[in-house]
Image (cartoon, coloured by chain):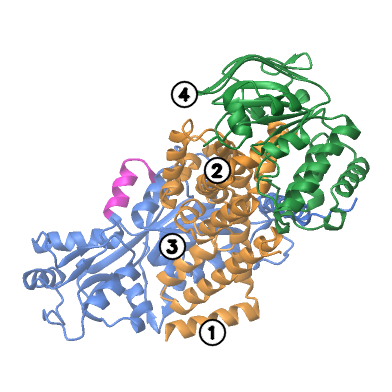
Amino acid sequence: MKTTNPWVRGWRLTVLVLLVLIVAAGCGQGGTLTSGGQDGTSQEPPQELKLATTTSTYDSGLLDEILPVFEEKYNYRVSVLSMGTGAALEVGKRGDADVLLVHAKDKERQLVQEGFFVDRQDVMYNDFVVVGPTDDPVGIKGSADAAAAFQQVAEKEAVFVSRGDDSGTHSKEKSIWKKAGTNPQGNWYQSVGQGMGDVLRMTSEQQGYTLTDRGTYIALRDKLNLVVLVEGDQALFNQYGIMVPNPEKNPHINYDGATALIQFFVSDEGQQLIAGFKQHGEQLFYPNAQ
Amino acid sequence: MFRLESVCKSYGSRNVVEIPGCVFTRGLIHGIMGPSGSGKSTLLRLLNMIEKPTAGQIIFRGHDLVTCRPRLSLQRRMAMVFQKPVLFEASVYENVAYGLKVRGLQRADVREKVLEALKTVGLVHLERQPARTLSGGEAQRVAIARAFVTEPEVLLLDEPTSNLDPQNVGMIEDLVRMINRERQTTVILVTHNVFQARRLADHITFMYEGKVVEDGPTEAVFTSPGDDRTRAFIHGDMVY
Amino acid sequence: MVIWDGLSQAFSLIITRDPAMMQIIWMSLLVSGVSVLLASAAGIPLGTWLGLAPAHRVRWLAQILYTLMGLPPVLVGLFVYLLLSSAGPFGVLNLLFSPTAMILAQTILALPIVTGLTMIAVRSKDREIRDTAVSLGASAWQVALTIIREARLAITGAVVTGLGRLMAEVGAVMMVGGNIEGKTRVMTSAIVLETRRGNFEMAIGLGIVLLALAFIINSVLYRIQGVGRH
């Protein structure tokens, strides 16, 4: 028949595209969507392992360096879920990840005691620094006492930007305010509920002060108008731990894989990889597994 | 063809149509006349089953339009053309083919009938044109072709020429006459144009405020109307 | 200037057809495309039904629909996360952090948009179209199909709007997809990641690629539906 009507063809084409996409999606679910990196080695397909971690470890690029070595050696494929520490702990508690690499030591220990996690080990630490404007109007540059510096910022009511998101960094900040005996309040104290990068940008724009992990600061340093003012205080050290959701409560998790990853992180090889990881020429993480 | 028994249609408390009894005979051209708002169009919509009467019965060739099931098979024995030709966003061909396609006819039959109908209304050359590019007169002719191509037993026309120029009016009136004579299709034509009613209709029904006030053969109604309102309307004295 | 660097970054991404980016683009298209198709498969009939029903009778449904059109993606993400979490009711399906989970979340997001806009499109078509179809002997189904066809431009608009919202959406896909490299990373979550990492040029580059992609998709969809044909 002579269809004189172009839109009939249009609809048929739409339906065709629809079918193709649905079929393609079906194939996609079949697991063919691994990244382009793995070209046909003859071994068995790698097992999947889900690692929930904080944005700071992932964004720094550390895991990009370490995980491929582990994947190659033990034939796993690690899916990294990077989120805030609070979210990572919650995801782990619900058994939605196989292993966690986070930095909230007190909270981690508490959750282990409550039976949510097992096999916790220290892996490494990095440190926090207090950053602020080059001209440092409050005058805390060179101080080795974070709490005292915080107190000065509060007294002068200089702008201080807080993560305000229950992240590891935020917990650290709160513990320092506590140590300083100050309850920060007022217009100068901005709790913004955003990631470290955003907080650093906001601090730089307003020429204020904030507490940051060194890694994120170094990565963004060129784009910021901020300098390190306080560093080296014991209170500023930031311990990373690795642990597994309790396999008795979460029988579906890949416990063997998780154990293998933990062993790798605390092994000499893993620890050396951590120590050797540099960004902009600076070491960001210090291995300290027992 | 149609028999109405105590038919009433109301919107809210307003009775738009109120007809105790009325008959439309098979094979004739019926003219329904009356001023605007007299309920002519609503009556046509009731006959075409687009709307249901609030009360009463409409009998179409022995079937009650309200209670009869399936509704569709009855409705497919009629066709209606509206005052404003509403054409689908498609070619002229597709528009005329619509009624045949929904009835599930074979493609070849559809093609044959559509071309035949387009020939009748003199628009074969526009077959592939998008309907929206047509002039008012062409559009109304397509709408009429689209209706009669389904070979209805009754063709309902609601002011089909009210927005057209005299040439197109003449063409459409010829068309209506032809459909009635050659196919023995009953035609019910709503119009407020007394001249058109006189030219075309065999039988006149005059409506006023929802009621039938005059009903009879055209010549009789025009030469000796029984109702003052009909007389005023026919002589153009009615203000409405 | 970061923006110029971003532009040149975008060009080099496109010219080299960076394999990681191609994978991300494919995942974006797959997830958002399938989601909008599923949402359309349900939303167009539903919207048509709502559009054909007397407005006063479906007023409440319409109001709920309008409200849902403004659903925050993160909220939908959280909802789907809790459903699919291993501690949740559908945990056994093991779908969390997979493209399927992302499709589920995005379908929920797009459904009210496609449904609502279809309803508006159908309502905007004159009652006369419906009467005409009925008078020509169309069954209830055929009437609905005719109206969908008559409103096809506006309905295409509804689908394109839904697709646009999904391709630009990051909260839900990040929440239930996990932004896993090579598996559930899409354009928007890659942009968030690059921004967080301080690679602004790359973020802007990806953003430009995303916009270009959206433009191409819209052009193609509108061409299929024949806008601008005379």
The three-letter code of the residue at mark 2 reads: Arg
Whether callout 2 and callout 4 share a subunit is answered: no
Distance in Å between CA atoms under marks 4 and 3: 83 Å
Residue C21 lies left or right of residue A172; in this view the side is right
- The residue singled out by tag 1 in the image is C8
Is A16 placed above or below A236 here?
above
Where's residue A152, x and y in %? Answer: 8, 72
Among the two numbered marks 1 and 2 on one chain, the one whose residue lies closer to the N terminus: 1
Callouts 1 and 2 close, C-beta under 8 Å: no
**Residue that appears at 90% across and 39% down:** B106
Structural distance between the alpha carbons of marks 4 and 1: 68 Å
Which label belongs to residue B12? 4
> Whole-Å distance between the Cαs marked 1 and 2?
46 Å
| Amino acid under disc 1 | Ser
Circle 3: residue type: Val
- The amino acid pointed to by label 4 is Gly
| Residue C216 placement, left or right of B240 | right
* Residue on which the image places disc 3: A266
| Residue A172 position within the rendered picture, expressed as x and y whole percent measured from the top left | 23, 62
Question: Label 4 is found on which chain of the structure?
Answer: B
Front position among marks 2 and 4: 4
Determine the image quadrant of residue C183. Answer: bottom right
Marks 4, 1: nearer the viewer: 4
Query: Which mark lies nearer to you, 3 or 1?
Result: 1
Of all chains in the rendering, the one displayed in orange is: C
Q: Secondary structure at mark 1?
A: helix
Give the foreground label among 4 and 3: 4
The spot of residue A247 in percent (x, y) is: 47, 41
